[in-house]
Structures are given as C-alpha cells and as structure tokens.
C-alpha cells in the first residue's frame, strides 16, 4: 500500500469510527427501531453538516485534500469531535493537500542548555522533555529516579534513551510499574496517533508504529480504535520498586523548539502533606546520592 492510500485509510477509519459512536438520540435526530449501523448513517452526518450525502461519502473515503476549513469545521461539529480530534482532522486534511515542494519532517533538535538548567532546578518535581515519538530527550534527577524501571529497561535505545511507548507496550514490567496500565496504554497510543496526524512523513515515527504493531497485540488494539490525544494531564499511580505506591499529579506543557520541532515538558508532583509527597522526597534524596544516566545524545 502506498503512502497516499494509507493516508486515505486513516481518514476513512477515523471518520467512520467517530460516526459509529454517536447515537441518533445524542445527535438530536429522530430514531427508529431498525438500524443496521451502531451510530449515525452517512446521510445523517451529511444533513447535520449541511452537505450532500454523496459529498460526505466521498470525504469519508479519504478524499479530503480540497475540502475547505469551513466544511471541515461543520463535519467536526456534526461528529461532535473534541478539541484534540478536531485538530487531528485538520492535520489530516493539511497532509492530504498536494505539496508544492518536497515535504520534510520537522528536524530533531538539541535541547538548549537553558532547558536542562530549568529541569535541574526542579528538585521536588519529576520533570522530563519528550518529543512526539515519545522519546525522553532530557530529564532531571528526580525524573530518572522516579522512572527507574523505564531507564533500566531493555527497551531503551543504544544510547540508553527511553521511549515511553516502547516501555509501556514492549516491557512486561511496565504493567507492574503503572498501576493503571490500561489507561497509560490508551493515552500513549492516542498521543502517537495525534503525532502521526501532525507528521505523516516522519519515517522514524512510522517505523516505531510498525514495530509496536508487530510486537504488541495491545498496541494493535489501541491503534485500531483511532483515539486521539494531544494534551495530557491527570493523576498517575505508580508502583515504585524502592518507595512503593505513589499517586502523583502530572501535567504536560508545550515546549516550542527551533526548526518547527514540538516537544512537551511533563511534570509529576505530589499533593502536599500526603504519603506520596514523603515518598517523593525520599526518592529525591536517593536521586541526589546516585549517579545520573548520561544525558541523551544531542540530535
């Protein structure tokens, strides 16, 4: 299958999946007992979006390149897409447009020293920077101590750089480390799906997705769901080998870089006065006495 056909398949599966999850009742449409599809019919989406059934059918087959933003917005509203899903749909449309010049992937760039200084200044929060492929490209001492099982995993690359997706889906130990492993797996696959929409020509990303699809049935199932996530925050429960169970608040923030690179800064912290805070303080003390892993290579 060539790249263009593969892209049309992504559009088809995404739109069909979003259509299937919306019931007529949820869309405010009259219902009938006899329905052959679990969600809306194509003609119902067309009515809600204000386009013809033929036009929407063509769109759902992957012919999205020449569609105006106004029409895409109407389809997004008809399918009740959330903000991340809407962004993903627009990314797919941009990727489908004929390129006027050779399309290049955003280059990997080095983390500036000022970013590492910022990470190192955080002593009571685990902080690390990752790219869209889920490579951890910079971290502070507490992040390494908190994620010791990931840094010691055989899924790290030759330079010892961890990849969150490889660790979660390819290292069985991750299911002990992440107490809510299913939620972590769903979120990680959805983050990769969003990155694939932003960067459809990223060969390294496609190779990673291929590797995970080949080796992990769990990843294949999550990838087939076509869930999308861009912003990532909430509570994370970890079972750390040295200090036991931790319940931490985490937040990911965009960290714009040079050459169109988009990384995010992820912070883990504990609620003051809790047992998790005491355990995180203990980890911070342990981190101060242990040698850190070598910094990821500059790329």
Image (cartoon, grey):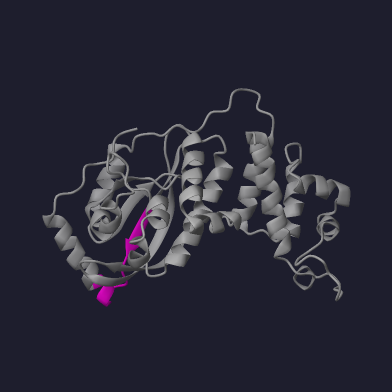
Check the picture and name the quadrant holding the C terminus.
Answer: top left
Residue at 40% from the left image edge and 54% from the top image edge: 170
Residue at 37% from the left image edge and 48% from the top image edge: 163
Expressed as whole percent of the image width and height from the top left, the position of residue 294 reads 21, 42
- Front residue (pair 75, 57): 57
- Front residue (pair 123, 144): 144
Q: Is residue 64 left or right of residue 112?
A: right
Residue at 42% from the left image edge and 66% from the top image edge: 181
- Front residue (pair 282, 59): 59
The stretch of residues the image draws in magenta is 265-277
Q: Is residue 271 magenta?
A: yes
Q: Is residue 59 left or right of residue 86?
A: right
Check the picture and name the quadrant holding the N terminus.
Answer: top right
Q: Quadrant of residue 77?
A: bottom right
Specify whether residue 109 is in view.
yes
Rendered position, 33 above or below 68: below
Q: Quadrant of residue 283?
A: bottom left
Specify whether residue 231 is in view.
no
> Residue lying furthest left in this view?
289
């Amino acid at each position: 299958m060539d790249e263009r056909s593969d892209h049309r398949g992504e559009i088809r599966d995404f739109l069909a999946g979003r259509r299937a999850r919306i019931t007529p009742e949820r869309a405010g449409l009259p219902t009938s007992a006899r329905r052959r599809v679990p969600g809306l019919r194509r003609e119902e989406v067309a009515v809600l979006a204000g386009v013809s059934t033929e036009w929407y059918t063509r769109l759902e087959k992957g012919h999205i390149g020449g569609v105006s933003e106004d029409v895409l917005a109407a389809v997004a509203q008809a399918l009740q897409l959330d903000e991340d899903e809407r962004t993903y749909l627009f990314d797919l449309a941009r990727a489908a447009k004929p390129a006027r010049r050779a399309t290049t992937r955003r280059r990997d760039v080095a983390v500036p020293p000022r970013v590492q200084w910022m990470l190192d200044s955080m002593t009571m929060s685990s902080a690390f920077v990752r790219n869209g492929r889920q490579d951890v490209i910079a971290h502070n001492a507490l992040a390494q101590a908190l994620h010791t099982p990931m840094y010691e995993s055989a899924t790290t690359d030759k330079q010892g750089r961890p990849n969150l997706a490889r660790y979660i889906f390819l290292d069985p130990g991750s299911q002990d480390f992440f107490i809510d492993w299913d939620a972590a797996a769903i979120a990680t696959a959805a983050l990769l799906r969003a990155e694939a929409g932003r960067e459809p020509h990223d060969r390294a990303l496609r190779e990673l997705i291929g590797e995970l699809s080949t080796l992990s049935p769990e990843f294949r199932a999550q990838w087939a769901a076509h869930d999308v996530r861009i912003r990532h925050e909430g509570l994370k429960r970890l079972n750390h080998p040295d200090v036991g169970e931790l319940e931490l608040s985490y937040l990911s923030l965009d960290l714009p870089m040079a050459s169109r690179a988009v990384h995010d800064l992820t912070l883990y912290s504990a609620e003051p006065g809790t047992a998790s805070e005491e355990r995180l303080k203990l980890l911070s003390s342990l981190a101060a006495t242990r040698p850190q892993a070598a910094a990821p290579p500059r790329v």
